[in-house]
Amino acid sequence: MKNVLQPPGDQVRAFRDRQTGEPIAMLNLLKFRKKAAYDDGRPSELSGAEAYQLYANAFREIMGPRGVRVLYSGEVKGLLIGEGDDLWDAVAIIQYPSTAVMLEMLRDEGYQRAQQHRAAGLEGQLLIECGVGFTF
């Protein structure tokens, strides 16, 4: 697992090229650091989860008015199917009105400032784009 805070250019281009104008959901699989570690070396008594919560609060403030909704967020309790316990601490599903809204977010100055808390709090993350839902 590698903590990459921003997607590389080829992934951003592929994400942009898949856009349909329809809403998307992003499945976030999160692994927190035991203790937050800020890039600028500042001392912190925050846990990784607490630092990430500062990011999450800023995210909601910045993105809520743009129609972004947190559909679910919560801790991972364990696996029922498969192997790999302790890979993730939390899961979040975020719905964006469109791919364009998410791309605009990445360029937003307030969002970029909030990234320091995300970087300090996360040991690793997977961000999985999900399309329009369907019924089983």
Image (spheres, rainbow, N blue to C red):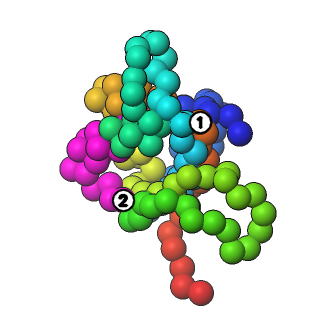
The residue under label 1 is: 123
Inter-mark Cα distance, 1 to 2: 22 Å
* Residue 3 falls in image quadrant: top right
Of residues 42 and 39, the one drawn nearer to the viewer in this rendering = 42
On screen, residue 37 above or below 124: above
Q: Residues within 10 Å of mark 1 (few under 14, many from 20)?
A: many
The residue sitting at 42% across, 60% down in the picture is 73
> Quarter of the image containing the C terminus?
bottom right
- Closer to us: mark 1 or mark 2? 1
Callout 1–callout 2 Cβ contact below 8 Å: no
Q: Amino acid at mark 1?
A: Glu
Of residues 103 and 29, the one drawn nearer to the viewer in this rendering = 29
> Quarter of the image containing the N terminus?
top right
User: From where the camera sits, is residue 73 visible?
Assistant: yes
- How many numbered badges does the structure rendering display? 2
Question: Is residue 15 located in the magenta-colored stretch of the structure?
Answer: no
Instruction: Please state the extent of the stretch shown in magenta in the rendering.
Output: 55-70
Of residues 75 and 71, the one drawn nearer to the viewer in this rendering = 75
On screen, residue 65 above or below 70: above
